[in-house]
Image: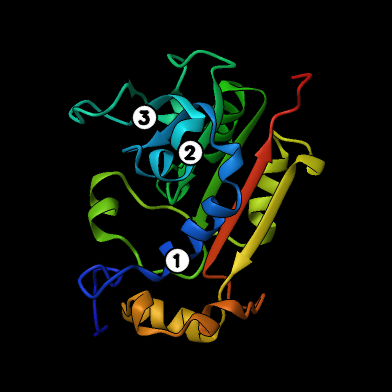
Amino acid sequence: TPISILFGCDRGHPIDRYYIENFLLQHKKDIHGRVLEIGDNTYTKRFGGNQVEQSDILHAIEGNSSATIVADIAHADNIPSNAFDCIILTQTLQFVYDLPSALKHLHRILKPGGVLLATVPGISQISRYDMDQWGEFWRFTTQSAQQLFEKEFTARSVEVEAYGNVLIAIAFLQGLAAEELKPEHFEYRDPNYQVLITVRAIKSKTD
């Protein structure tokens, strides 16, 4: 059995969040204007700050009192087109079965020139809570992410990167926390051990 079945949350900061938050920090200038985030707006406020003019929260079903929009992102016809300057989509697409439809809507609701900042899991345990509630369908590689996003965004406007190495993968699967590793453990990237995939995709200004 693993040391923790809670992604290390009971021991400290989850290892994948180390990479996610560094990715958002690196691209914080993209988080401005009207911003959409999934579930809550923690990252919108943390990394967007006073650059954000309007913060929207998307939730798939009724019941989230903080949500400003209720929609399944794969069937989001109720969300207006060309609405958002930035969409923050962290660790969400693995729970969406119809990925092509989800990407079509994400592209549609971005303003021309808007930016989608997404992260998806590579090597990771199953989230049992989410699988039971929503379904959990996918794990990704840089190749699958690149091809998936290129179908809606042009190849030139999609930047895909992978983070992780064998030590990080083992520690993450065991449920260790980021605080239990050294900073240099995170720095080395081995393309054969893709723990987290990040995607920055820009909608063309002519779309």
Q: Which residue is mark 1?
A: 18
* Dot 2 or dot 1, earlier in sequence: 1
User: Is residue 139 among the parts visible in the rendering?
Assistant: no
* Dot 1 or dot 3, earlier in sequence: 1
In the figure, residue 65 lies in which quadrant?
top left
Q: Judge whether 201 appears above or below 192 on screen.
A: above
At mark 2, the secondary structure is helix
Alpha carbon distance from label 2 to label 1: 18 Å
Who is closer to the viewer here, 119 or 96? 119
Packing grade of label 1 (10 A; few <14, some 14-19, many >=20) is some
Alpha carbon distance from label 3 to label 2: 17 Å
Q: Position of residue 192 (x, y in %)?
A: 64, 78
Q: Judge whether 26 appears above or below 30 on screen.
A: below
Q: Amino acid at mark 1?
A: Tyr
Q: Which residue is mark 3?
A: 58
Residue extending farthest right: 156
Q: Amino acid at mark 2?
A: Gly
Residue extending farthest front: 50
Callouts 1 and 3 close, C-beta under 8 Å: no
Packing grade of label 2 (10 A; few <14, some 14-19, many >=20) is many
At mark 1, the secondary structure is helix
Q: Judge whether 94 appears above or below 51 on screen.
A: below
Is the image coloured rainbow, by chain, by secondary structure, or in one colour? Answer: rainbow
Residue 178 tag number: none
In the figure, residue 105 lies in which quadrant?
top right
Q: Amino acid at mark 3?
A: Leu
